[in-house]
Image (tube, rainbow, N blue to C red):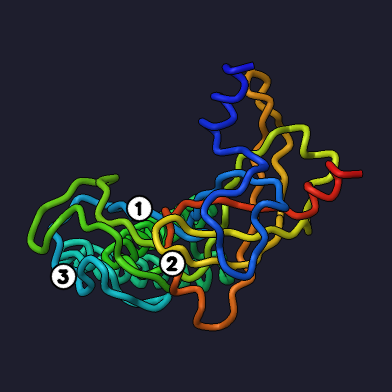
Amino acid sequence: MRKLIGYCAFLGITSLAGVATPGFAWAETQQSQGILRAVHEATLSSELAAQIEQIPYREGMAFRQGDLLVSFNCALPRAEAEAARQEVRVKKSAWDTNIELDKFQSVGRYDLIAAEGEYRKALARAKSLEIQVSYCEIRAPFDGQVQALKVAPWEAVSAGQALLTIVDPGELELNIIVPSGWLTWLHPGSEFTFEAQESHSTSAGHITRVLPQIDAVSKTVKVIGVLDTEDGASVQFAPGMSGRVAFTEGREAAND
């Protein structure tokens, strides 16, 4: 029995109240622990080997979707792309000429097919180089802030190297581990109250998803919820904050 109590304490699962929060009867709830995670978080990597030219945003700075986050020195790829575009014009002109000659049966069938093949090969190479040039800038995929910089301007990086981590602190989800037995009453839409341990800020919320698999050893399941914060109130919460989560619905079910 002591082992069971200790294990539940380790998970932070209890039906007893901790420090009282004014205006909320914690003692009348089923409780667990939750941690806030950002819905949008990403570590951006380089798609090519090049020298970094600029990184406009430093750690902690906010940006908007589409803003430039990293640019590279791409003088050589841009020159190659321009040369490829000129090559496409030349090959297209040669093909068009052969098409006109074919109308008068003044060109062999093989020469006509070869001219078309040369044009399409040049076009494919030009498109490939245009894609390479598009990697010369990394723009923000969503609104957010820079969490961590892993490189600096003028450094040479390799393809696939991590450059920076970005996060949107304005859209959060609450990850909660609960006993699998709670699934008799816990479901998407179930309401809860969350209190952040770091700031003691509280917010109502509701469950949005229940993961399909139960942990066979601990007999627990992960559920995900969102906070029902009012405009401006979300600044009281940040990714990584943890705290207790209280469900009044579970207490009512236990008393039935």
Q: Residue furthest right?
A: 256
Q: Is residue 254 left or right of residue 199?
A: right
Q: Hey, what amino acid is under mark 2?
A: Pro
Nearest the camera: 220 or 120? 220
- The image position of residue 41, as x and y in percent, is 43, 57
Q: Is residue 184 left or right of residue 83?
A: right
Give the residue at mark 2. 169
Nearer the viewer's eye, disc 3 or disc 1?
1
Nearer the viewer's eye, disc 2 or disc 3?
2
Q: From the viewer's perspective, is residue 36 above or below residue 72? A: above
Task: Please report whichever mark, 2 or 1, sits nearer to the chain's N-terminal start.
Answer: 1
Identify the element where label 3 is drawn: strand
- Pointer 2 with pointer 1, Cβ within 8 A: no
Q: From the viewer's perspective, is residue 41 above or below residue 81? A: above
Nearest the camera: 74 or 180? 180
Nearest the camera: 220 or 94? 220
- The image position of residue 222, as x and y in percent, is 64, 40
Q: Can residue 115 be spotted in the picture?
A: no
Identify the element where label 1 is drawn: strand
Tell me if mark 1 has few (under 14), some (14-19) or many (20+) residues whose alpha carbon lies within 10 angstroms of its own. some
Give the residue at x 21% y 58%.
149
Give the residue at mark 1. 43
Q: Is residue 137 left or right of residue 173?
A: left
How far, Cα to Cα, is label 2 from label 3?
Answer: 24 Å
Give the residue at x 77% y 39%.
182
- Pointer 2 with pointer 3, Cβ within 8 A: no
Give the residue at mark 3. 54
Task: Please report whichever mark, 3 or 1, sits nearer to the chain's N-terminal start.
Answer: 1
Looking at the rendering, which quadrant does residue 7 occupy?
top right
